[in-house]
Image: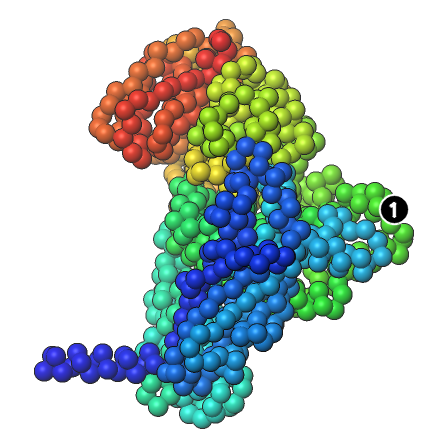
Amino acid sequence: MNKILLFSFIFIQTLIKAQFSERNLSSEKWQFKNSKDKNWLIATVPGTVHLDLMNNKIIPDPYKDENEKKVQWVENEDWDYQTSFKISSKELENQNAELIFNGLDTFSEIYLNGKLLQSTDNMFRKWEIPVKQYLKNGDNLLQIKFKSAVNVGKELAKKVPFTMPESPRSFVRKAQYQFGWDWGPRLVNAGVWKDVKLSFWNNAKLENVKIEQKALTKEKAELNIYNEIFADQEGKYIISINNKIKNIELKKGKNSIKLPFTIEKPKFWQPNGWGDPNLYNIKISLQKDSKIIAEKSERIGLKTIELIQQKDEKGKSFYFKVNGNSMYAKGTNWIPSDSFSPRITKEKYQKLIKDSKDANMNMIRVWGGGIYEDDEFYKACDENGILVWQDFMFAGSFYPSDENFLENVKGEVKDQVNRLQNHASIALWCGNNEIDEAIVNWGYQKQFKYSKEDSLQVWEDYKKVFHEVIPNTINEIAAKDKSIYWESSPSIGWGHKESLTEGDSHYWGVWWGEQPFEIYNEKVPRFASEYGFQGMPTLETTKSMFSGTPDLNLENGTIKAHEKHSRGWEIIDNYMKRDYNIPMDFVKYNYVSQLLQARGMQIAIDAHRRAKPYNMGTLYWQLNDCWPVISWSSIDYLGNWKALHYQIKRSFENQVILTEEKDGVLNFYAINDELKKFEDVKVEIQVVDFNGKVLNEITTVPDGKTLEEIVKFDPIEIENLIPDSNKNEVFLKLTLKDKNQKIIAQNNYFFAKPKDLKLSKPTIKIKKISETEIEISTDVLAKDVYLIGDTHFSDNFFDLLPKTSKKIKLSKPLEKIGTMSLWDTMNP
């Protein structure tokens, strides 16, 4: 009997699958060639022309040596791609067949069996083309002819009567960073960068599913599920949501079917640090005549999110409320993690987001000069409780607003919002990166000698794209609970005082303005969505810049070529000599550059968090790299944590105890970002010398004693705390405790800059506990201990206090572990 049931089940499933099917044409044998050439070469899809040229040994790896310069010719050529695939007579029996291109970069013509099907002009759009009438039994030839985006862009630029900055990149709807940035190479790609599929369907197809959260309480979640269905055959159908069946009537053509759906006793999706990011699977299937003809699955999270902007005595607030609670946003900015995006693996996405979660982040801003990331990125954010601030892909230039461009942008917004809006992680749509600021502050109009009419036209173009087309399209297609829109990041440029009192801020007085790190204590915005400082990548990644034996020398051409900011080395040196001794040895210089970067960002984050609730968000620039490079990232191209990422993990703890030194007085702040309260809190303060001797001890208790969000303790005059000691020879050891004497947070505070500390040589010992765990100890203060080895250390670049030890876990066993501390850079 069981065998008969099993056979029946298999037979039914076969019938079901026969109603719709999809073939991945990416796995067919692809070829490519320069359009001028006759000989075809082997290609990979998804891919890019640069990768194909590398695989065929026609160009060198542009990430190595100074090879980037040698491959610039590629962007000026046209490239042809093709593949052949077989179609069976059985497949031709289907009523409909569609070719689906999930990503073509960028200007192309698509031919099937010699017939021109479609011209494309946007890397970020999905192209669905009916092809039933053009398919034939047996062999079919698919060809895609790509035009040089640079050459097409130049032709488009000629239609505008004035010079656009960064021309021609703003005329082409492709990843803007491909044209080069101050952290990335110029590699203007072409090719089939996402999957190509051939889809067969009958009667009707389920084009899109939009899930709207109508109401959410602890008792139930009330949803509206909008199903966009295109019917080839009108009539009676059945739609089911998680096996709950509903009879529907479809007309020929487009149909929108709204169905209510309730989840009892829902578990909320919580951001990282507040609880679990609970997710629910929603499966929608469309049936006709007892056969499933289409189905989709969505994974959603139940949450509420609001962007709160209320006028107050200091300006206007800017913060997110999640599930009714005010959330302090702690996070970073994301750029594409490879200049050749098709080779970003699911594993790399998952690791970078897990690394963000492990560093106590709850928000990532997807920067507007890159790409709308792969579904795996948003899936990883959903699963790890990371909210996504999603820029649209416009950055740092002026953009046209002719009819074709606006229609193209509208199609792009539709495709991306439809694809992404059901993700629990989506928090905000942002129109662009730094375009409002570019128009107002960057002096392009003067540089390019704009007339008054030209300048007015730029602003009119801006308003059409970012005040009208994008927000109107979002409102048209996004669910009401997924339609928060912010026009431009930042809302006001960092040179204007209002940038600190309202909206979000990109504060670049540090680095670009070359102000000292301490200026962060004064320039505190309502929401810091960009700020940063460069540091070198790890030694492993630095060595990967070379194709042969690495020459680790700051004067080496390869090392210089992997610093894309024109004054990068000079700026790093200027800051380094303020706070550190500049080492002559390359390895020590690499180490100190990382400490410098971490120190700057720690000062910024501490200032932001001390200002809570005036400041309610801090997103540093940037998490990751697209190639091996000296940059603002906290994780380098090979996935190694720089000193900054270890510091971010400490700075973003849910509970921290911070010190502010001002006019001879110390102020202490206990900060709590969690939803729970701590009763009867106190801070124990010890003055400790670098040999471990406790010179003074004091306990301070705040009025009220309850730590809910932020508590400022009574100030202490420095001379009352360390009357007889040299500030260069002591530090404060701070311990925040609750009523049960349980430690909530700990921190150390130094009174002098690193270069002025009177350190003694530490005797650092490492004891092996197991294959993947060590214990490290020291006799005197070991400042900024750097563990060196080919493994990931659970902590690194940390202060090891005198006569203490610390256990460290390793991601894989290591026979020999090197160590370095700040003392080594002071004593060559």
Which x, y percent locates residue 438? 74, 47
Point out the residue furthest to the bottom here: 235
Q: Residue at x 40, y 32 (%)?
A: 745
Q: Nearer the viewer, residue 629 or 223?
A: 629
Q: Residue at x 53, y 29 (%)?
A: 536
Asked where in the image residue 708 lies, by quadrant, the reply is top left
Q: Nearer the viewer, residue 456 or 690?
A: 456
Point out the residue furthest to the front here: 38
Rendered position, 424 above or below 64: below
Location of mark 1 (residue): 449
Q: Would you call the spot at circle 1 few (<14 residues within 10 Å), some (14-19), or many (20 or more)?
A: few
Q: Residue at x 62, y 48 (%)?
A: 74
Q: Is residue 2 visible?
A: yes
Element type at mark 1: loop
Rendered position, 790 above or below 827: below
Q: Residue at x 84, y 53 (%)?
A: 162
Amino acid marked by disc 1: Lys
Which x, y percent locates residue 566? 67, 32
Rendered position, 390 above or below 480: above
Q: Relative to 70, is 135 on the left or the right?
A: left
Asked where in the image residue 111 lies, by quadrant, the reply is bottom right
Q: Relative to 544, is 428 on the left or the right?
A: right
Rendered position, 93 above or below 601: below
Q: Is residue 700 visible?
A: no
Which x, y percent locates residue 108? 61, 64
Which x, y percent locates residue 684? 40, 24
